[in-house]
Structures are given as structure tokens and as C-alpha cells.
Amino acid sequence: MASSQFDAATMHSHPQLAAATQMPDDGSGKKEVYRIEQFKMIPYPESMHGIFFAGDSFVIQYTYSDQQRSYTLIYFWLGHHSSQDEQGAAAIGAIELDKKINGTGTIIRVVQDKEPLHFMAMFHGQMIIFKVKYSIDFKFLFSFFFVIE
């Protein structure tokens, strides 16, 4: 099997290829992750990036650049068991983030188990989805395995 290095510039010069592969870049840009809690976007600790809960919704602001400009993708991820209110709050949060950057972002809805390739690449293919809702008990448990800010 032959492999080659990912070239993000190719994606910008060939938008049809980027659309077909769902890979605008290699996933190594800057990301800010928020978990929806009581209808608010709460910053999610970097040590927990890639760990999701089916009972929650998340918003991820992802920024990357080519030689000419920066691009922003705003994903809102909806867990299978997240409430409609939480899902709505995630969608609104994505719109609010886009407004902060003058509407220049691209908002992408992602449903659990339907994650596009680029979404997976942002977490280096290291996603874990728990079938429950995040709780303080999980934060305590994770403190034994991860450094939680």
C-alpha cells in the first residue's frame, strides 16, 4: 500500500477534491472546544479533547491557514442522548461564535456516529464517546487517568 503526505494547499487549489474527501486540511489547526452546560458554552479542558459524551452537545471552533488566509470551521456535535434544548443551545453557540468572527466561518452540524473525516482528524483519530452524560463524577474519575485543568 502506498501512502503520501497530506498537502493542504492541494485542497484549496482543488475545492472539488476537498469537498469529495471532506478534508479541507490535515486536522492540525487550532481548536477550541466547548461543552454545552445549562444552555451555556463552557470551555472544555484540552486534556479532554476527543472525549465526548452521548448525553451532551459540543461546539468546536477550528481555525487553519493556507499561504493566503485563515479559515474557520465551527462544528456543533450532537450526542445521541443530548436533549433538544442542548442541541439547540449548541446550534446557537455555533452561530454566536460565527458572529464574533464577522460571519466568516463555516458552521457544520455533526451527529454522533456520523462524524466526517475532518472532524476525526482534528482529534488524530483518537475519539472516545461515552454513552452517558458528562458529570462531576467523570471529572473525578478522569483525574486518575488524565491531567484535568
Image (cartoon, rainbow, N blue to C red):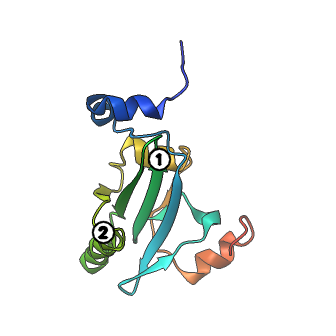
**Where does the image place residue 21, in percent across and percent down from the top left?**
34, 32
Depth check: give the residue in front, 9 or 108: 9
Mark 2 to mark 1 CA distance (whole Å): 17 Å
**Which residue is under mark 2?**
102
Can you say whether 123 is above or below 18 in the image? below
Label 1 crowding class (10 Å Cα cut-off): few <14, some 14-19, many 20+?
Answer: some
Depth check: give the residue in front, 92 or 57: 92
- Residue at screen point 32% across, 59% down: 105
Q: Is residue 46 left or right of residue 78?
A: right
Q: Is residue 52 left or right of residue 89?
A: right
Depth check: give the residue in front, 138 or 74: 74
Q: Looking at the rendering, which quadrant does residue 82 occupy?
A: bottom left
In the image as oriented, which residue stretches furthest toward the front? Answer: 68
Quadrant where the C terminus sits is bottom right
Residue 90 visible in the snapshot: yes
Q: Looking at the rendering, which quadrant does residue 25 occupy?
A: top left
Can you say whether 65 is above or below 93 in the image? above
- Disc 1 marks a residue whose amino acid type is Ser
Total marks in image: 2
- Residue at screen point 34% across, 38% down: 22
- Residue at screen point 36% across, 71% down: 97
Label 2 crowding class (10 Å Cα cut-off): few <14, some 14-19, many 20+?
Answer: few
Using the image, tell me which numbered label, if any, was put on residue 65: 1
**Where does the image place residue 111, in percent across and percent down from the top left?**
31, 57
Precedes in sequence: disc 2 or disc 1: 1
- Residue at screen point 47% across, 50% down: 64
Q: Is residue 1 left or right of residue 57?
A: right
